[in-house]
Image: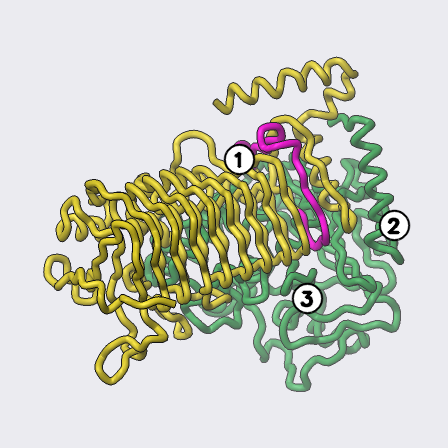
Amino acid sequence: MTVPIKIFSLFVTSIFVLTASILPEKAPKALLSEYGYFSGALNQLQPAEGVFAYEVNAPLFSDYAEKSRFIFLPSGAAMQYRESGAFQFPEGAAIIKNFYYPLEAAHPEKGRQIVETRLLLKDVKGWKALTYVWNKEQTDATLEVAGASFPVSWINTNSKKVDLEYVVPNVNQCKGCHSYDGQFTPIGVTLKQLDNTSTGSDNQIQFFQQQGKIDGIPAAFEPGKVFRLADYRKREQSLDASARAYLDANCAHCHNAHGPASTSGMFLNAEETDLEHLGVGKPPVAAGRGSGNRKYGIVPGKPSESILLYRMEHTDPGIRMPELGRQMVHEEGVALIREWIKAL
Amino acid sequence: MFLKFRAKVMKPLFLLTAFFSLMQVAAFAQSDVEKKIQTQLILAEDGETVNLPAGAFEISGTLSLDGKNNITIRGAGQDKTILSFKKQTQGAEGLKISNAQNIVLEQFTVEDSKGDLIKAQGVKGIEFRDITARWTGPPKASNGSYALYPVQCQTVRIERCTAIGASDAGIYVGQSDSVWVTACIAKNNVAGIEIENTTHAWVWKNQAFANTGGILVFDLPDLPKKQGGHVKVYDNLVGRNNFKNFAPKGNIVGKVPPGTGVMILATNDVEVYQNKIWENKTASTAIVSYFISENPIKDKEYNPYPSRVYIHDNIYSEGKRMPTWKSKLGFIFWWKFGKKVPHILYDGIENPDWKDAQGNIKPEYKICIGQNENGTFANIRADKLGLFKGKISKDKTPYDCAY
């Protein structure tokens, strides 16, 4: 795409204005490499000093993109546990999420294409979201304020070539999900998501504790013993636990009493115990044609009569859920929720 | 008409841009305009006006404004700035305003989004002025839900706006407080204007024509904002709202019978007066409980009964009106009344907790029907209805009171 000079200059001015107004202390860098979060070749994503890899138990589906996640904490500063919502982060902290596709899903050794890196930066005013789009050479990524889209393709696990118009969100769209009572918030950095050993032999929470990088974890915490989300991909726990973990990770960032979808009265966070709020026998409020002519969010035993599943099975923007960040149907997710509703 | 208009606008625009340079033409290419608008919305400073250029533009994704104060988004006029979301691939809304204060939207048209056209959520002070929000072509279930959709907002003003073709409600105000809706036109929507779980709303001098239902005041269960009320509906023109109900099933407005003028569902403190309500074939004015929806109620804090509703000084037209057969209610009305359905209908389902020792509703909960021109009345006693039995009462004296 050719960028007309006028628009381009406006864009450059924009970045300048953004620098001056939104982030008075820390300007957003034009290039990802400028932050120094990674050492060596950027696309190896080797964490630099103060940067820690982490994994979540139940990931958000993002059009089959894989993600590698990191937390940057300034030296001497730590995260703080909170009873609800994500951990509290110190000023200067960053959460770094890289999105990539393996060239061939069945053969990860054949390499990958990193498409995008999303940063959440904590400054005096709170959280800011920035997206960086990787170049073809995979040497660096460039700041994109107003979002972008471009084609990507890969060979999936069934050896089929998939073509996708990949969408990079703009900063407002980031907040479309990252919102708690209207304030920008991280989502996945919670006890229920980080209580696992995916990044090494240590439990992540214990690792952060040992490193002095997290405070306030309840004394009663024992790895895997307190409430944690199931890894729904492995079906390591019951069907119910897997399904609830899936809904928590994929829906509850909006669908909770403090999120952008609180308007609907449908709360899908794993802690929710009220069946009506989960959608059982609940008529829609503002679903419109998203209802698919079905009467209730969830009809126990009847996935094909449940609006929840209808919205997961579609890609039309007026029907699909989540509204943002999903253009493909998550076949495995649909199968899980179908099975769960059937068994309810 | 729209095509004709578009040709008229685009031609001079094209000539103008051609007159400048190739670069300028490229600058007006759709995706660049979209990106420019979105960038402006992201970078807008406190007090800034974001001007939308004249022209008809295809927009591919939701345009959004978040976390801003004192911003005006201004078009070049409803006939001049047209944002079409017909080919939308990203996001469901056309324009979305969230977590903001003192936002004014004015003088432009939005159309054909996949979901809602303009949604404002969590905004303190939102004004819609001279906005047209419409789905083009014949009204259909695949149109989005709401044309203008403020929800969880404080201080909402909607003035001189037009809403057409919504498969739910044209102008829908939900879970908000302090609301004006005035001088607006709503037509060919399922619900023309709907006030839902909203407090302190004034709806006056609007025109609701050819919707399934003209003006609805609803309180629904299971929502964070539990109770609406203190709603005034006056000086409106509510005519010929006989359009077929094209809402997708499952949505509560899908149960509104074609031919509904004004409907009050489970809301308290509602005054409906000085409206002209004519040729709505099924129910010119209906006061009903949530039970009429036949949906189960599981929300324990929810009050499904209307109370302190006062209907007075409205002008109803005479004339034969054949109620719709396409809803159970309409069918019952037809069965009971034939072509002479009374204008003011009450479902008569009363809260047992609101009754005194004699079994009468306590004065503080009463439904009051004052003087209305041609204000014929019936209590259909839906609690005892069964389909064909039950005693409909046309006696107005129990409702002879005022607030």
Quadrant of the frame with the N terminus of chain A = top right
Residue tagged 3: A189
**Chain in green?**
A
The image shows residue A56, relative to residue B250, as above or below, that is: below
> Which three-letter amino acid code belongs to the residue tagged 3?
Val
- Please check the rendered image and state whether residue B73 is part of the magenta-colored stretch, yes or no: yes
In the depicted view, which residue is nearer to us: B136 or B261? B261
* Residue positioned 32% across, 70% down in the render: B366
Label 2 marks a residue whose chain is A
> Which three-letter amino acid code belongs to the residue tagged 2?
Ala
Residue tagged 1: B111
Which stretch did the figure color magenta?
Answer: B65-88
A142 horizontally vs A331: left or right: right
**Tag in front: 3 or 1:** 1
Q: Residues within 10 Å of mark 2 (few under 14, many from 20)?
A: some
In the depicted view, which residue is nearer to us: B97 or A194? B97
**Chain in yellow?**
B
The single residue placed furthest to the left in the displayed view is B389
Q: CA distance from mark 2 to mark 1?
A: 35 Å
Quadrant of the frame with the C terminus of chain A = bottom left
The image shows residue B43, relative to residue B399, as above or below, that is: above
Query: Is residue B285 in view?
Result: yes
SS at badge 2? helix
> Which three-letter amino acid code belongs to the residue tagged 1?
Glu
Q: Are marks 2 and 1 in contact (CB under 8 Å)?
A: no
In the depicted view, which residue is nearer to us: B237 or B161? B237
- Please check the rendered image and state whether residue A342 is part of the magenta-colored stretch, yes or no: no
Residue tagged 2: A20
A301 horizontally vs B348: left or right: right
SS at badge 1? strand
